[in-house]
Amino acid sequence: MKRILVPVFVLGLVFGLSALAGALMSNNDAYAATQDLLVGKVTVTDGDTVRMGEHRIRLFGIDAVEARQTCQLPSGEWACGRASRRALERLVEGRTLTCEVHDMDRGRHVAVCYEGTVDINARMVRRGWAVAYTQFSEDYVEEEAAAQRDGLALWRSEFERPHDYRARLRAEQANAQVPQEPPSADCAIKGNISRDGTKIFHEPGQRFYEQTRINEDDGERWFCSPAQARSEGWRRAVR
């Protein structure tokens, strides 16, 4: 099985799913991962996405409210998207996770992540900070029902399910047909990531430039020059 290297900062790891296939020891750091297993410390991107070294990991089977999404409490509007992110940070900060990869999506590993034997995905849903992503999996439906029953986190507010929120925004954006504005006139090159993870940049004037939308939450970004985009691993769109 092909290996990829991810820093773990421990001398040895054993996990119940399978024995880790190989470790390299250097300066008291250990490195271990396989094609189906990533092990290491992470930083949190949002309530259902983390980064482990160079690897972006989308938590399988769950869907957290988007970073900019708000929910409605009796007392007023609540920045529930930011709260969901902080909840995941509290769960994983400083801890070593073992992530079992199920799939790839837009360059991200889709995985179930564990801290020891604790299923982090399940815990986020059970504590009410994410919902079961039933469009793709029924794995966490029971955890969602329990969180709703107990009125935890999101379930103490009125909120739009993240999938529906994203669909509504896409529809509104399409209906408005408003061109997406770059951060500055000098940085108008769009760095887009296809579903298979290919990184492509579109320059103003190219055929698909206007219809290409940049979603920075998915790792897409703006560039100020073709040279900058190429230096960071992106290639120019053919059209």
Image: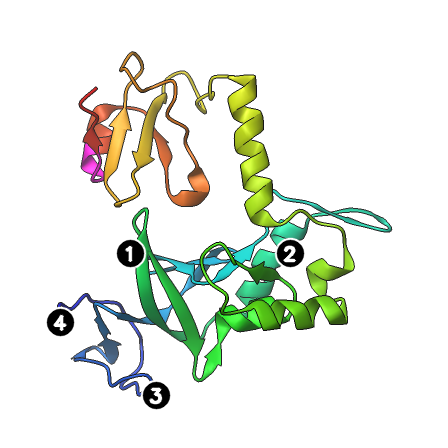
Secondary element type, mark 1: loop
Disc 4/disc 1 C-alpha distance (Å): 20 Å
Residue 207 position in % (x across, y down): 28, 15
Q: Which residues are magenta?
A: 230-234
For this orientation, the residue located farthest to the right is: 75
Mark 1 sits on what residue? 54
Disc nearer the start of the sequence (4/1):
4
Disc 2/disc 3 C-alpha distance (Å): 31 Å
Mark 4 sits on what residue? 1
Mark 2 sits on what residue? 83
Position of 17 relative to 186 (above/below): below
Q: Is residue 140 left or right of residue 37?
A: right
Disc 3/disc 1 C-alpha distance (Å): 25 Å
- The amino acid type, in three-letter code, at marker 3 is Gly
How many neighbours does mark 4 have within 10 angstroms: few (below 14), some (14-19), or many (20 or more)? few
Mark 3 sits on what residue? 16
Position of 84 relative to 175 (above/below): below
Residue 45 position in % (x across, y down): 47, 53
